[in-house]
Image (tube, grey):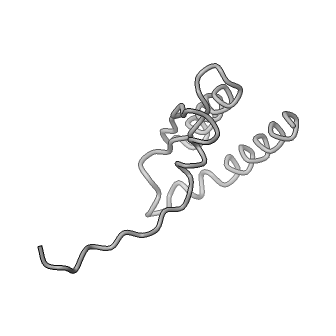
Amino acid sequence: MNAHVLRTAIIAVAALLWLGPARSAEPNWPDSLTIGTASSGGTYYVYGEGLAKILTSALDFPVTMLPTEGASASARAAAPRPPTFPSSSPP
């Protein structure tokens, strides 16, 4: 499992490095990027820290990491949310 995760991370980083310079000129490109990781001391914390450093250097773009409370917290943060609409009822 760890070899598969590491291989996937390396492929993702390589793809981002290859596509990075062309994408950084996009008009809707965000000002920064934050990577959610597991809690400090965990494997994914270390992966996220390394990935943030690599992407910051390769993209010349601020990439930071944000420790979470683990996989369930990361899944909740990444879950799609229903759109919110302004209320049309009078106050």
Quadrant placement of the N terminus = top right
* Residue at x 64%, y 19% (from the top left corner): 41
Q: Quadrant of the C terminus?
A: bottom left
Taking the spot 64% from the left edge, 39% from the top edge, the residue there is 71
Q: Nearer the viewer, residue 15 or 36?
A: 36
Q: At x 56% / y 52%, what residue is drawn?
A: 78
* Spot occupied by residue 51 in the image (x, y as percentages of width and height): 65, 35
Q: Nearer the viewer, residue 61 or 38?
A: 38
Q: Is residue 40 above or below residue 25?
A: above
Most distant residue in the top direction: 41
Name which quarter of the figure residue 48 lies in: top right
Report the label total: 0
Residue 84 against residue 15 in the figure, above or below: below
Q: Is residue 68 left or right of residue 48?
A: left
Q: Nearer the viewer, residue 18 or 37?
A: 37
Which residue is pictured at 75% across the width and 45% down the height?
Answer: 14
Q: Residue furthest left?
A: 91
Question: Looking at the picture, does residue 54 appear above or below residue 17?
Answer: above
> Is 54 on the left or on the right of 63, as rendered?
right
Q: Position of residue 89 (x, y in %)?
A: 19, 79
Q: Is residue 29 left or right of residue 2?
A: left
Where does the image place residue 46, in percent across and percent down from the top left? 66, 25
Residue 12 in percent (x, y) is at: 73, 47
